[in-house]
Amino acid sequence: MDKETKERNIVVEGKDFTSELFGDFDENIKIIENTFDVDIVSRDGVIRIIGEERSLIIVEKLLYKLIDMVKKDGRLNKQQIRYAIELVMEGQEDAIKDLLNDVICVTASGKTLKPKTLGQKTYIQAIRENDVVFGIGPAGTGKTYLAMAMAVKAFKNNEVSRIILTRPAVEAGESLGFLPGDLQEKVDPYLRPLYDALFDILGAETYGKYRERGLIEIAPLAYMRGRTLDSSFIILDEAQNTTSEQMKMFLTRLGFGSKAVITGDITQIDLPAGKNSGLKRVTKILEGVKGISFIFLGKKDVVRHHLVQRIIAAYEKFEKNIPRKKQPKK
């Protein structure tokens, strides 16, 4: 016996947002239709949802939340649609409003930066409330970019007097001397992702001005040794490639009025064999220390192409099934 189909209507009041909601060639709506086995059409300011009653209830909630997102931020992308679907199916549709209202900063191009997932929102809140925060998670979860945005906001609000960005140049090693140019030019390729993020947030001209005045410093981790960093927002990127000694050295650089964010992905360690990751070890050493927060982001927080989530899940599944080597008896 066929399931009974019913219909619900949503009247779009005021400006018609359906083109932004539906997306190019209705790509957004097709995701919803395929997920819930419904048909969605728009005509004369009315959105009609046709399908089984149980699906209609969920899709109606979803569309109201998506319309709010369009009114607030304009055009939606497929990643936002999929994440909104997850929240509604988990009964967390009210969390979408929290994400919409949490503005971090505005980029040089006028783009409003906000957390895109609940994990990212937790991460941002941890940075607001703690002086040392570890953001640990896979590629594409916004660990470094969001930390950069928070650093720029703190700097513009006069909460800190400078921004310091650093990462270990693990790949350099002995080959560093064979690269052309002076020392800064040799390490620049390893710091390029940090430059790119700052260009996007500040704009090239403002970034250049701040850099010339020493208000922004981008340097390899080795440059931090022996320094005390006061009134600074410090970001250590790719921290999974620090040794335990380097991690301790970095954390003990923190001076008065400073804040540090350490980001990394413990599934992508590039250290030589026999070297332990300082990031993996520090999660055990500093667990429970007041003023320090560990935020673990997962595949749900990936805001790149939706295939990145599937790639991460596939690797996790594969690695779980790899048989562990037996330790030799002592």
Image (cartoon, rainbow, N blue to C red):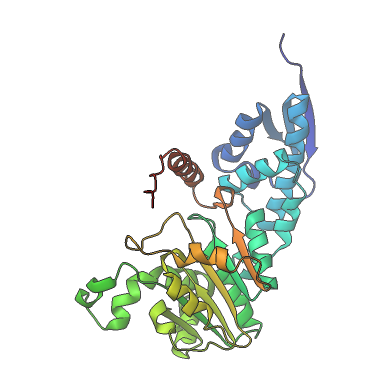
Q: Nearer the viewer, residue 29 or 210?
A: 210
Decide if residue 117 is in sight here: yes
The x, y position of residue 65, in whole percent, is: 74, 46
Vertical placement of 299 versus 291: above or below? above
Vertical placement of 164 versus 307: above or below? below
Furthest residue to the front?
330
The x, y position of residue 169, in whole percent, is: 35, 71
Is residue 283 found left or right of 184 in the rendered image? Answer: right
Q: Residue at x 60, y 30 (%)?
A: 34
Is residue 316 found left or right of 21 in the rendered image? Answer: left
Q: Residue at x 61, y 42 (%)?
A: 82
| Image quadrant assignment for residue 162 | bottom right
Decide if residue 114 is in sight here: no
Is residue 177 found left or right of 142 in the rendered image? Answer: left
Vertical placement of 317 versus 287: above or below? above
The x, y position of residue 225, in whole percent, is: 43, 85
Furthest residue to the left?
178
Q: Residue at x 56, y 68 (%)?
A: 285
The x, y position of residue 329, in whole percent, is: 38, 49
Is residue 10 found left or right of 278 in the rendered image? Answer: right
Furthest residue to the bottom?
213
| Image quadrant assignment for residue 33 | top right
Vertical placement of 226 versus 330: above or below? below
Q: Nearer the viewer, residue 92 or 298?
A: 298
| Image quadrant assignment for residue 121 | bottom right
